[in-house]
Amino acid sequence: MTFGLPIHRAGDRTRAAARDRMARLVAVAAAMLICGSAAQAAATIKICSIDDRSGAAADTGIQSYNGLQIAVAQANAAGGVNGHKVEIVAYDGKTDPQLTASYATRCAEDDKGLLIIGGNPAAPAAAMIPVAGEYGLPYLMLSAGTDNLTDEPAPFHFRVGPRNSQDAAAIADLLVAQGFKRVAIANNSLPFGTDSAQASTAALEKKHIAIVSHQTYDINATDLAPQIAAIRNAKPDVVLVFPYAADGARVLRTMKQLGLQVPTIVARSALLETLRKLAADASDGVMIPNTIDPTRVDVKKYLETYKAKFGPVQPTMYPVLGYDAGEIALQVIGQTKVLELLDKGDLAGARKAVRDGIESIGKFKGLQGREGASYVFGPKHHHGSPDENWFTFIQVTDKGTNLVKPDIAAFKPKP
């Protein structure tokens, strides 16, 4: 027995040491689990911005991207989305459909993006639609106006800006209200131009307004005198132009050179500073359909925020579209189901939940539209801009440098 007691005590010490080591291991493992859970909860959410920021319609992509940055910065300053910081992964598609589609694929595969926001020019915007469908990647399209882009089936893409037929209806309503009866149309041969002209023709026919001349021109044509002369000879009391930036400036300059001085409406592309700078005083007096009301208090406040961060900006739809799309996305990302799936690491499930969340959001009040108007989304309604109470008009002044609220009463046929 004289040897048993020391052996027993040594065993106790061994077992105690083992228990201590086990406790430390459990504590370390628990700490690792806690840290892992915290890291997972704080995982960054990636939104891809894919748009044209250096091509012909660079203004649209730059301003929309800036608007998205404001929305995301405000969310991150408030702590992110339930603790998740939001990161924008930005790509310049350069108005190239193939490049744009490649960036959309990169967003889905390499960046692990939760959704895409972008798409102002129609052709590159359309190029992202099949990618969104293939990867189940929600895509909030901005100002691309071609009517059929959100036709069914539209499983994962939505439109924030208006479609061409809505611009056309707003223009037709204005012409009726102001007593115009003889309309001439000039449009370029690209999808935006032809689709806009077709939509306007249908809208004018419904209002029983005569189209006295319709001229389609090649976007690269340097001499537009034959088309503008044909329009002048038809004696219209108003001209509608559906161009991109450079060709739109050529149309307006040619109209001035040939003495065609009648009230003129140019499509939303005239909201682009590029078009108005190229046209200079030939653009003065031009009326443009727009979708923001710069007299709204919230719009004024937002434009001041934009100006403080990015410099002076004209009151057009483009700085607003990216912001509204970002706000829609952030609200949906904050839904419980989306966050639960993100925290589990189920990106595919989270993407689908974002799609479902946009469909279920119903009405959403953004900065587009007149006071009281709202976006409307649903399972079979992926085009958010409503037909009513949405459009305003704005007019060009000061040799194309400024956009101002027009005197609508003065916009009427010349005697």
Image (cartoon, grey):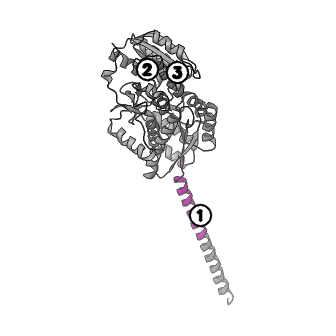
Question: Which mark, residue 127?
Answer: none
Asked whether the viewer can see residue 109, the reply is yes
**Number of numbered discs present?**
3
Amino acid type assigned to the residue bearing label 3 in the image: Gly
127, above or below 328, in the image: above
Of mark 3 and mark 2, the one earlier in the sequence is: 2
What x and y, as percent, mark residue 158?
50, 31
Q: Decide which of 342, 22 is in the foreground and name it.
A: 342
Magenta-tinted stretch? 24-44
Whether residues under marks 1 and 3 lie with C-beta atoms below 8 angstroms apart, the answer is no
Q: Kindly report the distance in space between the C-alpha atoms of the residues bearing marks 3 and 2.
A: 12 Å
Report the quarter where the N terminus lies.
bottom right
102 up-or-down from 166: above or below: below
Mark 3 secondary-structure assignment: helix
Whether the magenta-drawn stretch holds residue 29 is answered as: yes
Residues at badges 1 and 2 in contact (C-beta under 8 Å)? no
Q: Amino acid at mark 2?
A: Ala
Q: Quadrant of residue 222?
A: top right
SS class, disc 2: helix
Q: Which residue is mark 1?
A: 29
The residue located at (43%, 15%) in the rendering is 203
Q: Which residue is mark 2?
A: 168
Give percent across and percent down for residue 105. Answer: 63, 37
Q: Nearer the viewer, mark 1 or mark 3?
A: 3
- Residue 189 falls in image quadrant: top right
Spatial separation of the CA atoms under disc 1 and disc 3: 63 Å
User: On the image, numbered disc 3 is attached to which residue?
Assistant: 193
Residue 182: where, in percent of width, then height? 40, 11
Q: Nearer the viewer, mark 3 or mark 2?
A: 3
- Distance from disc 1 to disc 2, alpha carbons, whole Å, reads 64 Å
Q: Amino acid at mark 1?
A: Ala
